[in-house]
Image (cartoon, helix red, strand yellow):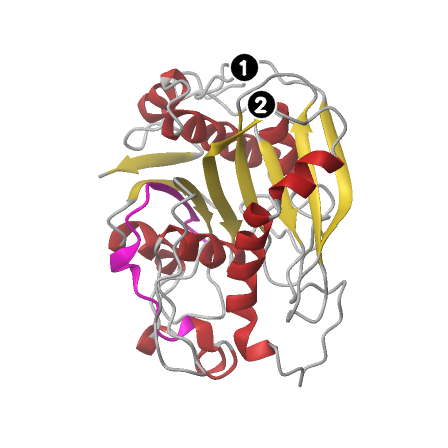
C-alpha cells in the first residue's frame, strides 16, 4: 500500500506515525461461539501476529451488511503490528440473509453489542482456536473499534447510550473491560438531524446520548461523508468527537467519503473514493493511537499529532481536546 505523503514535501516519504516492523499474521475463521437466544451462533475471525507476547485485543465491529470477511486493510494491519483482532459477524450481515420482517431487526443494535461482549466472555475458546496464540494476549488491554454501524456498536461499549426502540430506555451497556476505542465514520445525533428514512427505519439512530461516552477514543471522519441518513452533511460524523467527553482526538480526512478511501475491504465495490494513501494514513494513525492509549509507546502518536497539526498535511488533520 502506498505510503502517505509528508507534510513537508508533498511527495511520498516517511509516515507520520511510525510503528514496529510488521510481523507475519495467523488468521483463523470461522471460530463459532454458542449464542443462546440469538437465533444464530456467533461466527468470529481471529487474527494475530505470529510472534510477540502481551498482545492487546481489538474488537472490530463491521458496518451494516458486512461480515468477518471485511475490513482486511484494518484487521491485517493491526494484527501485523502487534494486536489480536477479533471480528464477529453481526446479525445484519448479508451472509446471514435475515428477512425484512425478522422480529430481531428492531434489536439489531443490541445484538451487536452483545456479540462484542460474548467475544470477551468466550475469549478462551477464541485463543485456543489460533495455533500458537495461547498465553500471548493481554486481556487487560482491550479496544473496541468499528466503522459506520460498527462505530455505534463500539461506542456503546465505551459509554454511548442508545434509546431502545422497544422499551424506551437508554441503558448503560458500557463494558469496563474495554479501555479505549476507534470510531470510524460513526453516526451523530438523532432527532431533526435525521432524514425521514433514517428516522423511520433505523430506530437506534433516533436518540443517541454521547454525554456518557467517557472512555478514551479516537474518532475518524471524512469531510465528504454525505450520508443519506442525515440532513446535516459530512460534519454529522464528527459528533462523537464533539459531544463525547472521552473522545479525545479527531482525524479528519480531506476528500474522504463514507468508506474513507477503502477501509472496508481490498476489493470492496462500495468504496466510492478509493485512495490507498488515505487508507495507509488511517492504518498508521489508528495503530499509533492504540499503542499510545494502551501505554505501550507514544512516539508514533506524538509524531502523528505533529505531522497532522493544522492544515499543513495534504491528506487530513488531527485535532485533540
**Side of 84 relative to 180 (left or right):** right
Residue at 61% x, 42% y: name it: 123
Residue 157 location (% of width, % of height): 42, 53
Boundaries of the magenta span: 205-225
- Residue 236 vs 222, above or below: the answer is below
Indicate the quadrant where residue 302 lies. top left
- Residue 182 vs 25, above or below: the answer is below
Residue 139 location (% of width, % of height): 51, 34
- Residue 284 vs 194, above or below: the answer is above
Indicate the quadrant where residue 253 lies. top left
Q: Which corner quadrant holds the N terminus?
A: top right
Residue at 61% x, 37% y: name it: 85
Identify the residue under disc 2. 81
Instruction: Find out whether the residues at labels 1 and 2 contact each other: C-beta distance under 8 Å.
Output: yes
Q: Nearer the viewer, residue 88 or 228?
A: 88
296 inside magenta stretch: no
Identify the residue under disc 1. 20
Q: Secondary structure at mark 2?
A: loop
Q: Secondary structure at mark 1?
A: loop
217 inside magenta stretch: yes
Indicate the quadrant where residue 314 lies. top left
**Side of 298 relative to 91 (left or right):** left
Residue 170 location (% of width, % of height): 34, 71
Q: Residues within 10 Å of mark 1 (few under 14, many from 20)?
A: few
Residue at 22% x, 39% y: name it: 321
- Residue 215 vs 24, above or below: the answer is below
Amino acid at each position: 500500500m502506498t505510503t502517505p505523503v509528508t507534510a513537508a514535501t508533498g511527495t511520498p516519504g516517511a509516515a507520520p506515525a511510525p510503528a514496529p516492523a510488521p510481523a507475519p499474521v495467523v488468521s483463523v475463521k470461522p471460530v463459532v461461539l454458542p449464542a443462546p437466544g440469538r437465533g444464530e451462533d456467533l461466527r468470529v475471525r481471529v487474527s494475530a501476529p505470529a510472534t510477540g507476547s502481551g498482545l492487546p485485543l481489538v474488537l472490530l465491529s463491521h458496518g451494516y451488511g458486512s461480515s468477518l470477511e471485511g475490513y482486511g486493510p484494518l484487521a491485517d494491519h493491526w494484527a501485523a503490528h502487534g494486536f489480536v483482532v477479533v471480528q464477529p459477524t453481526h446479525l445484519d450481515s448479508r451472509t446471514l440473509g435475515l428477512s425484512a420482517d425478522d422480529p430481531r431487526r428492531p434489536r439489531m443494535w443490541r445484538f451487536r453489542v452483545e456479540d462484542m461482549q460474548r467475544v470477551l466472555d468466550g475469549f478462551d475458546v477464541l485463543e485456543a482456536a489460533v495455533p500458537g496464540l495461547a498465553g500471548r494476549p493481554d486481556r487487560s488491554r482491550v479496544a473496541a473499534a468499528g466503522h459506520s454501524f460498527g462505530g455505534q456498536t463500539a461506542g456503546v461499549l465505551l459509554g454511548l447510550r442508545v434509546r431502545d426502540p422497544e422499551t424506551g430506555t437508554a441503558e448503560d451497556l458500557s463494558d469496563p473491560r474495554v479501555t479505549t476505542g476507534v470510531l470510524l465514520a460513526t453516526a451523530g445525533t438523532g432527532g431533526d438531524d435525521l432524514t425521514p428514512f433514517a428516522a423511520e427505519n433505523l430506530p437506534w439512530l433516533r436518540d443517541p446520548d454521547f454525554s456518557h461516552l467517557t472512555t478514551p477514543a479516537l474518532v475518524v471522519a471524512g469531510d465528504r461523508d454525505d450520508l443519506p441518513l442525515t440532513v446535516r452533511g459530512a460534519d454529522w460524523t464528527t459528533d462523537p468527537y464533539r459531544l463525547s467527553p472521552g473522545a479525545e482526538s479527531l482525524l479528519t480526512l480531506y476528500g474522504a467519503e463514507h468508506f474513507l478511501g477503502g477501509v472496508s475491504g481490498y476489493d470492496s465495490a462500495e468504496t466510492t473514493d478509493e485512495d490507498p494513501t488515505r487508507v495507509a494514513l488511517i492504518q498508521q494513525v489508528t495503530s499509533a493511537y492504540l499503542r499510545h492509549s494502551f501505554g505501550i509507546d507514544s512516539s508514533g502518536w506524538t509524531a502523528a499529532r505533529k505531522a497532522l497539526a493544522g492544515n499543513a498535511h495534504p491528506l487530513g488533520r488531527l485535532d485533540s481536546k
